[in-house]
Image (tube, grey):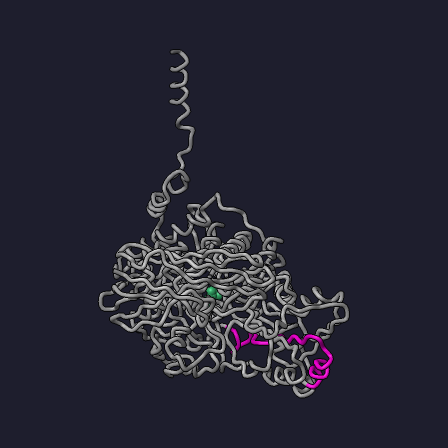
Amino acid sequence: MRFASFIAGFALTAAPLVAQVPVYLDETKPVEDRIEDALGRMTLEEKVAMLHAQSKFSSRGVPRLGIPDIWTTDGPHGIRPEVLWDQWDQAGWTNDSCVAFPALTCLAATWNTEMAELYGRSLGEEARYRNKSVVLGPGVNIYRTPLNGRNFEYMGEDPYLAGAMVAPYIRGLQSNGVAACVKHYALNNHEVNRHNTNVIVDDRTLYEIYLPAFKAAVQEGGAWSIMGSYNLFEDTHCCHNDRTLNRILRDEWGFDGVVISDWGGTHDTDQAIRNGLDLEFGSWTDGLRSGTKNAYDNYFLAYPYLEKIRSGEVGTEELDAKVRRILRLAYRTVMDRNRPLGSLCSDEHYAAARRIGGEGMVLLKNDGGLLPMKVEKGTRILVVGENAVKMMTVGGGSSSLKVQREILPLDGIRERFGDVAEIVYKRGYVGDVTGEYNGVTTGQDLSESRSAEELIADAVAEAEKADYVIFIGGLNKSDHQDCENTDRAGLELPYGQDAVIEALAAVTDRLVVVNVSGNAVAMPWVDEVPAILQAWYIGSEAGHVLADVLSGDVNPSGKLPFTFPEKLEDVPAHIFGDYTGISQRDTVDIEYKDGIYVGYRWTDMQKKTKPLFAFGHGLSYTEFQYGRPVADSAFMSEDGTVTVSVEVTNTGSRAGQEVVQMYIGDRKSSLPRPLKELKGFSKVYLEPGESTVVTFEVDRDDLSFFDPDRHEWVAEPGKFDIYVAAASDDVRGKVSIELK
Ligand code: BGC
């Protein structure tokens, strides 16, 4: 009894000494309560200060309340080096070198969702270690034209594939307490006139082709932020577009994250207030030049907004909604005290980059089994081409990096084969010898004074004596190649490379062409070259990855995430002639007259034009045989599912991985539909002689199309064909089901 009253007395006297943790800081309270509490404590000025940048890449928190600033960074292949507060120039840090992961086209080419998760997680660890709260990426704009200078940052032509790959990337990234900022939402499908292109697209195409990957990023990936694109849609810029941001993103998809403008993508205060933008970055992106006193104070969502509120012209409802969302982002990132610490340039990150790169390489052609190389003592290997020795991590625009190391292709080949083989290098052609972006320089001297003819003759003389000739060319990260803000001039390989390849092919039948690019290129010499490898931009481990695949240490298993057309005239975006590629000052209307027939959807319909290499194509050093696909039921009920299974056997002599693809076609529908559309895939690893059964679950959604009149997805009763395929042009079996 005495003891109890002692306790009670102690509690009474001690209580005032225990500081009350305010709700917004109390980790035991639900985040939404903490948000409301923080909001209630903020002044008008503090709220507005949160809505816009305070430097090139950061925005303000609430210092008085201990809510930290938000730091963003590019994205999407590695963590961008630090720039000065107000300028794009380098800050000159010595500890901001990163691992460059393979470009997103390569990730998409793995068709392996585990690789996407590994990628996001590893990148997030680097971002976290560098104390970033938001990574500006990944990008999922659909590959509509091979001229788009930014395709290398995206995940190909198919909405299903891009959506399936983006979600695990985001989950992996965000597991570090670092937000993904999915970009560029929406319809940013080429670069020329990117600020003044007004896209005209019908609703069906919008919902079936251009939105699904963003929707998957939001609903399946759970993205915490999204970036509005530069272009216009329905005559309004996409950074403050009521239709795309308020109505689709928030109302239809339930997005509760932050909409961040692309850098310099905000144009109007009223629209920015009402049409869904939360956080404005990069207006007057040349730093302070165009601002008056302090450029950041004069952003559209800074003083001009404050003035409108103070004068009573607008209320604070939108303001509070924006601040709530930014606070939510803060609680998910900088305010999460339990998030991991991250790591930079770890062995694990290099290993991840190498693994992803190896799985993404696409063996396009391999006549006579020229690859993998059989190298013994004295084998003579000739390597030709600028891309064998050119660093590719610097350049390309905002995704440019400063890397701790980049293994060049030639060095990777030397390291792998150098102790037995004789390796000779010849330049072959001169591309772009520059190597600088925003003050990061490669430090390489690639200057060359010999003429094109001399370079070819030199390479050819050596090729005649070689057991293997490996030509390593393609595009690079310079303007009008694979580079932001510009598009390519044509589908052809630049710098006279076709002539070099043809000259080499004339003297050797042991020629391997390695195309380094994030885009399809024309290959007029395709029939003369026995082996072709699509090598992407692999980043830090480029040379190792290439040697892994050439040697057979890694059996290639990548498949193309976009169609390689034979010529530009086969691409619907160009057939219908709405893309001019000419830079203009005024708004340019671009009508997507190709509609839903992008990529293989077009080649399937246009039976007469065969692609050079089809979507989903990719060879292996082994062979896979497919059994007959079977469905567990011939009918599907309204809300039922059907399981389709197929046996796949490795009939070759090496272990390998196969990407089994499932496409669905509707036999008869009220609106025209593509012959078939990708609705599932599975990557399986098989030892020689081993078999496995791959299953796909098909539901109503997989049978649906978007009906623009009803504004909903509709599955019409009737027969559907389910195709099991090794590529979009290599169907191995078909089974039909009927929707009741
Ligand atoms: C690009 C974005 C990038 C931003 C910040 C813009 O020019 O379009 O993708 O994240 O700059 O560097």
Q: Quadrant of residue 302?
A: bottom left
x, y percent for residue 497: 60, 82
Residue 466 visible? The answer is: yes
Q: Quick one: 514 or 295, which is closer to the camera?
A: 514
User: Exactly how many numbered labels are in the figure?
Assistant: 0
**Residue at the spot 31% in from the left edge and 68% down from the top edge:** 666
Q: Position of residue 733 (x, y in %)?
A: 42, 66
Q: Position of residue 447 (x, y in %)?
A: 67, 79
Residue range corresponding to the magenta coloring: 457-483
Is residue 588 shown in magenta? no
Quadrant in which the N terminus is drawn? top left
The answer to which of 586 and 566 lies nearer the viewer is: 566
Q: Residue furthest left?
A: 710
In the shown orientation, is residue 203 left or right of residue 556?
Answer: left
Q: Quadrant of the C terminus?
A: bottom left
Residue 46 coordinates in the image, percent (x, y): 38, 52
Name the quadrant containing residue 413: bottom right
- Residue 18 relative to residue 426: left or right: left
